[in-house]
């Protein structure tokens, strides 16, 4: 039987009833906040395209993490902006580098905070690409050694988890091997398994000062047209030892998130990237839509698609509403 016996509106009449039958729930425990750390002291430099976010010196980063912890957010992921860059990205794996110093400071003052570090070369190379160049192209296999050194240096500084974002083939296996050989068997790897060559990274590249000096990253990041390839990328990273896999970006790739969730019994992260954040912020500032509702609806859609955790610049604002 159908209408009038069945009236689906009966279960929508009040917030209390709606909450009782709600199929997807978003929690502060699902959120991971990205933070940008830079050299110097007392630095709190606004990021123009990302309102409410800053490049922070280590001292201000620690203050920010304390606030984040007070909101109940369980984890942060750190991106570094070094004072100097070179062709081989030596600041990425320098034991005294910006991320290494930041991790030590945060874990000293906020030991319960889960500190994840981005493992990539683009913020540290003078050319802005995610690895070592040979003949104008990123050399995959030479880059693996440096990514492994970077990941190890982060963990030796106290990082709780490493997240390789470079999209080099074989980097999860290389990092897993070097961590295990150095008795860091219990450190998990969150792999950017399906990372697309997306236009939605624009504001991030301002924030991390990582715009390529020439060309783009389509030779190593994924073609936005491909979903079956994403399944292969995820499968390979799991085989190599990834503990958590990620889809990035999130909103334009909800179908990929759903497919990964259906195919693999693995913890799944999604990155609600800077362009997704900036669009909602800009539309909200113009009065074109309700910013808070759009934020929460977007995050809920990512969770509904299958993400177990969401890396998002909205984490602080969302946590206050949850």
Image (cartoon, rainbow, N blue to C red):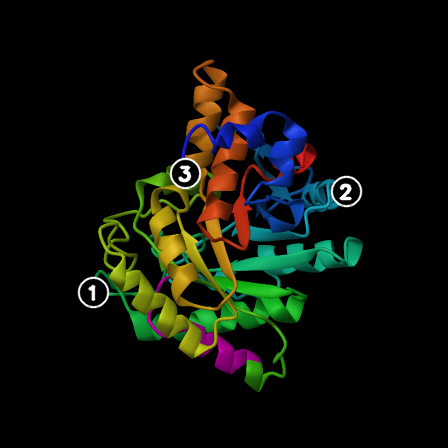
Residue 126 placed where, x, y %? Answer: 38, 53
Q: Cα distance, mark 1 to mark 2?
A: 49 Å
Residue 69 placed where, x, y %? Answer: 74, 46
Say which label, 1 or 3, has the lower sequence index: 3
Q: Which mark is residue 70?
A: 2
Q: How many marks?
A: 3
- Mark 2 closeness class: few <14, some 14–19, many ≥20 residues within 10 Å: few
Q: Cα distance, mark 1 to mark 3?
A: 69 Å
* Residue range of the region highlighted in magenta in the rendering: 167-179
Tell me, yes or no, whether the two marked residues, 1 and 3, touch with CB atoms within 8 Å.
no
In the rendered image, the quadrant that contains the C terminus is top right
Q: Nearer the viewer, mark 1 or mark 3?
A: 3
Taking the magenta stretch, the answer to whether it contains residue 169 is yes
In the rendered image, the quadrant that contains the N terminus is top left
**Left or right relative to 284: residue 29:** right
Q: Residue at x 48, y 71 (%)?
A: 242
Residue 222 placed where, x, y %? Answer: 28, 56
Say which label, 3 or 2, has the lower sequence index: 3
Q: Secondary structure at mark 3?
A: loop
Q: Secondary structure at mark 1?
A: loop
Taking the magenta stretch, the answer to whether it contains residue 59 is no
Residue 53 placed where, x, y %? Answer: 57, 34
Q: Is residue 2 above or below residue 80?
A: above
Q: Which mark is residue 135?
A: 1
Say which label, 1 or 2, has the lower sequence index: 2
Residue occupied by mark 3:
1
Q: Main secondary structure of the magenta part?
A: helix
């Amino acid at each position: 039987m159908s209408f009038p016996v069945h009236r689906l509106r009966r279960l929508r009449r009040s917030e209390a009833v709606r909450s009782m039958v709600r199929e997807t729930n978003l929690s502060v425990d699902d959120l991971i906040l990205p933070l940008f750390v830079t050299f110097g002291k007392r630095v709190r430099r606004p990021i123009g395209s990302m309102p409410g976010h800053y490049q922070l010196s280590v001292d201000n980063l620690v203050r920010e993490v304390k606030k984040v912890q007070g909101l109940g957010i369980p984890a942060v992921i750190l991106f570094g902006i070094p004072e100097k860059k070179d062709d081989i990205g030596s600041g990425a794996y320098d034991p005294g580098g910006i991320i290494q110093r930041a991790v030590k400071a945060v874990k000293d003052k906020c030991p319960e905070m889960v500190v994840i570090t981005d493992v990539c070369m683009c913020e540290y190379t003078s050319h802005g690409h995610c690895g070592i160049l040979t003949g104008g192209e990123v050399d995959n296999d030479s880059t693996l050694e440096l990514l492994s050194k970077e990941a190890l240096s982060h963990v030796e500084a106290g990082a709780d988890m490493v997240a390789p974002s470079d999209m080099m083939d074989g980097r999860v296996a290389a990092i897993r091997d070097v961590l295990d050989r150095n008795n860091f068997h219990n450190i998990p790897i969150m792999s950017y398994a399906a990372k697309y060559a997306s236009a939605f990274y624009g504001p991030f590249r301002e924030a991390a000062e990582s715009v390529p000096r020439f060309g783009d990253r389509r030779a190593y990041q994924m073609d936005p047209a491909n979903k079956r390839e994403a399944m292969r990328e995820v499968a390979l990273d799991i085989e190599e030892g990834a503990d958590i896999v990620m889809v990035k970006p999130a909103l334009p790739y909800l179908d990929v998130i759903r497919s990964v969730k259906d195919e693999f019994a693995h913890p799944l992260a999604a990155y609600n990237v800077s362009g997704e954040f900036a669009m909602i912020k800009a539309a909200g500032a113009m009065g074109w839509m309700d910013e808070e509702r759009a934020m929460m609806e977007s995050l809920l859609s990512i969770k509904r698609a299958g993400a177990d955790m969401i890396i998002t610049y909205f984490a602080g604002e969302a946590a206050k509403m949850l």
